Image (cartoon, rainbow, N blue to C red):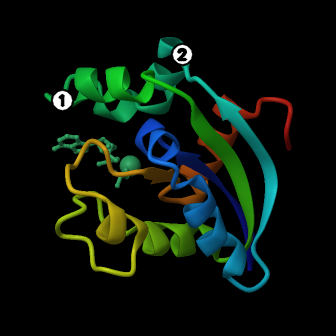
């Protein structure tokens, strides 16, 4: 079942020079490919839309500030079961709990700066792709 998902390589990943490493892991999965990609500094309005479900949570403001702190790589990735697959490749939200071998488990320590975002369902993927690539269908 081929799918499309929205992936962000967060500002910490870009600052730390981990873009190639993370994209390499995505590209090495059989049949997955990058359908759209751009280096982009995200503005507050875009981030508020993207993280609307977390508004009001204690981590929300520092999260938005961090996400606007420098360029991110914004991507659409497509391929077999890519929504579930990139979530697995990323690992759980807390990088210390994330298993070694996952992106977060290999490179992260603090929860906010966990390197990568990936849509968590078909519905989120549709919603998020529209936010970041409004002309892409
Ligand atoms: P996810 O990225 O694994 O889907 P969400 O719960 O949707 O995790 O949270 C969105 C992002 O907000 C996380 O990736 C992380 O950067 C940040 N975040 C989530 N929970 C916390 C927290 O408890 N403290 C600090 N940052 C958090
Ligand atoms: Mg999430």
Circle nearer the N terminus (2, 1): 2
Location of residue 109 with respect to 100 vertically, above or below = above
Residue 40, percent from left and from top: 65, 28
Check the image and report above or below for 111 versus 106. above
Picture quarter with ligand 1: top left
Mark 2 vs mark 1, CA separation in Å: 20 Å
For disc 2, the marked residue is: 43
Residue that sits furthest to the left in the current view: 58
Secondary structure under badge 1?
Answer: loop
Q: In front: 91, or 55?
A: 91
Q: Position of residue 116 (x, y in %)?
A: 46, 52
Tell me whether circle 2 and circle 1 mark residues in contact (CB < 8 Å). no
Q: Residues within 10 Å of mark 2 (few under 14, many from 20)?
A: some
Count of marks, rendered view:
2
Q: Quarter of the image containing the N terminus?
A: bottom right
Residue 46 place in picture, x, y as percent: 55, 21
Give the residue drawn at x 68%, y 35%.
39
* Foreground of the two, 89 or 55: 89
* Disc nearest the viewer among 2 and 1: 2
Q: Residue at x 68, y 41 (%)?
A: 129
Along the line of sight, which residue is nearer the eye, 104 or 55? 104
Mark 1 CB in 8 Å range of ligand 1?
yes
Residue found 47% across the figure and 42% down from its top: 10
User: Residue at left 52%, top 13%?
Assistant: 45
Q: Secondary structure at mark 2?
A: loop
In this view, the residue farthest toward the front is: 17
Position of residue 110 relative to residue 108, above or below, is: above
Question: Where does the image place residue 61, in percent across and percent down from the top left?
Answer: 25, 20
The part of the image, by quadrant, that contains residue 102 is: bottom left
Residue under label 1: 57
């Amino acid at each position: 079942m081929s799918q499309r998902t929205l992936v962000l390589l967060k500002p910490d990943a870009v600052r730390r020079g981990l873009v190639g490493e993370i994209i390499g892991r995505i590209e090495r999965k059989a049949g997955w490919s990058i359908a759209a990609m751009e280096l982009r500094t995200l503005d507050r309005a875009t981030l508020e839309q993207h993280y609307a479900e977390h508004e009001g949570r204690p981590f929300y403001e520092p999260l938005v500030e961090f996400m606007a702190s420098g360029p991110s790589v914004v991507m659409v990735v497509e391929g077999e079961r890519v929504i579930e697959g990139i979530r697995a490749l990323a690992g759980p939200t807390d990088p210390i709990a994330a298993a070694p071998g996952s992106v977060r488990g290999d490179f992260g320590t603090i929860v906010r700066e966990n390197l990568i975002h990936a849509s968590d369902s078909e519905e989120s993927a549709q919603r998020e792709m529209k936010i970041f690539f409004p002309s892409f269908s």
